[in-house]
Structure formats: structure tokens, C-alpha cells
Amino acid sequence: MWASLGTPILDKNDRAVNEFAVRGDPAAEPCAHERPRIRRLGRLDLPAIADHLLRLEPEDRRLRFGTRLSDDGIRAHIAQIDWSSAVLLAAEHDGRIIGLGEMRACSAGRERTAEVAFSVDRVWRGRDIGSELLRRLSTAARNRGIHTLLIACQLDNGRMLRLAHHVGARIHIDHGDVEARVDLPNATPMTVLMEIWDETTSFWPG
């Protein structure tokens, strides 16, 4: 699903992904009024990213990656993150990632594109976490000169399809695979301020 990003750069944080022991306890049931903290991730967050993605059940992995990716496949996916161009945002609760949004550049021509993907722990779904992550990633994409966001998913991934329709994406369906394209306007001084505000405040309004 992701475009090739070249040879991954491995360091002690990447190795920590392979050594990280995933806790077996599921995410705690949140209270109705609770809002997660949202922040941008970096290399030091690799073990927490692995914890979240490796907790996904087989069906959730299929919806997230387009296939029931093995644990080793998820570790390889994480190792291929190009931190010079990718943007990863986490929704956190009690210090644990319960929602993850990823944006990875997949072309660098006149029309720059990036692919985005999301995963949210089951007990936290239905709280607009995916919508908020997409809003912030869209702002970050505009500020980096991205013209189009690509959302690839399976035809039976109703949540992603509703999210794509909500942002006015152009939908293309081919043999059960869906590609949604979101056209982005150019960056403005306001979008730069919005990204700074998002990264400074972390918490949602309301």
C-alpha cells in the first residue's frame, strides 16, 4: 500500500521495535467525556508505535494495511518510516497510543502527493479521532507543499469511506480496492499558524 521510501535507517530506536514486548492488556474503556491528547511523534516513540500497531487484531490489520500483516511485517513497516518527510500523529490516553495517523510522501513531481492511513483502538472508535487526525495531517500536508492526499482502503472499510466522503474526496474503486483522493489548497499563513497551534495545545477544543 505504501510507496517505497528507500533503504530504512536503523538505529537503537529501530532495534527497540524488534525487542519491544507488546503488553497483552487491552486499552481501558474510556469515559464518555474523555478526550485523548494528540501530539506529533518522532524516533523516540518507535516502541509506542509498535505497541499500538502490534495490538491490532487480524481483521483490523487487514483494514489498516490492506492485508493481515504479520508482526514481522508491521515491524518492517515501522522500520521504513522516513522521518525526514513522514508525519505521524498519535492520540494518546494515559501515556499510551490509542490512535495513529500516518502521512508518507509518495511522489515528488509537479503534483506532490502523500498517502495517509489511520488506526484507532476499538474501544475509542466513534469519537471522531480519525477525523481530527486527518484534519491535522491535511494542515501539515499543505504546509509541506503536498497537493493531493491519497487514502487507500478496502471496499468494506465503512469508517474510512465515510471519512473520505466527509472531506469531499474523489473515490475510485477497482476490484474491491478503494483509492480516495483529497485535493488540497496551497498553504497560507493561517495554515502555518494552525499547525503551530495544534502542536502547542495538543488537546482538542470542546
Image (cartoon, rainbow, N blue to C red):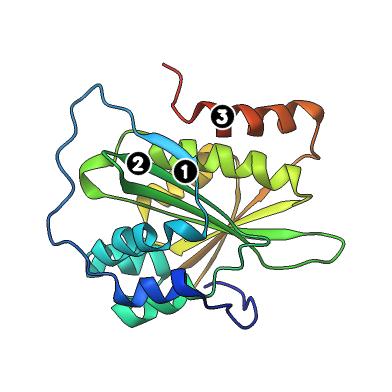
**1 or 2: tag closer to the N-terminus:** 2
Q: Nearer the viewer, residue 169 or 4?
A: 4
Q: CA distance from mark 1 to mark 2?
A: 21 Å
Residue at the spot 61% in from the left edge and 59% down from the top edge:
86
Spatial CA span between label 3 and label 2: 15 Å
Instruction: Give the residue number, with chain letter if any, for mark 1.
Output: 163
Quick one: label 1 or label 3, which is nearer the N terminus? 1
Mark 1 or mark 2, whichever is nearer to me: 2
Hey, what amino acid is under mark 1? Leu
Query: Percent from the top left, x then y, of residue 15?
Result: 41, 76
- For marks 3 and 2, the one nearer the N-term is 2
Left or right of 12, for residue 112 = right
Pointer 2 residue:
92
Look at the numbered disc 3 and give the secondary structure of its residue: helix
- Amino acid marked by disc 2: Glu
> Percent position (x, y) of residue 118?
43, 53
User: Residue 96: x, y in percent?
Assistant: 29, 47
Q: List the residue tagged with mark 3.
A: 200
Mark 2 element type? strand
Does 197 sit above or below residue 103? above
Crowd around label 1: few <14 · some 14–19 · many ≥20 (10 Å): some
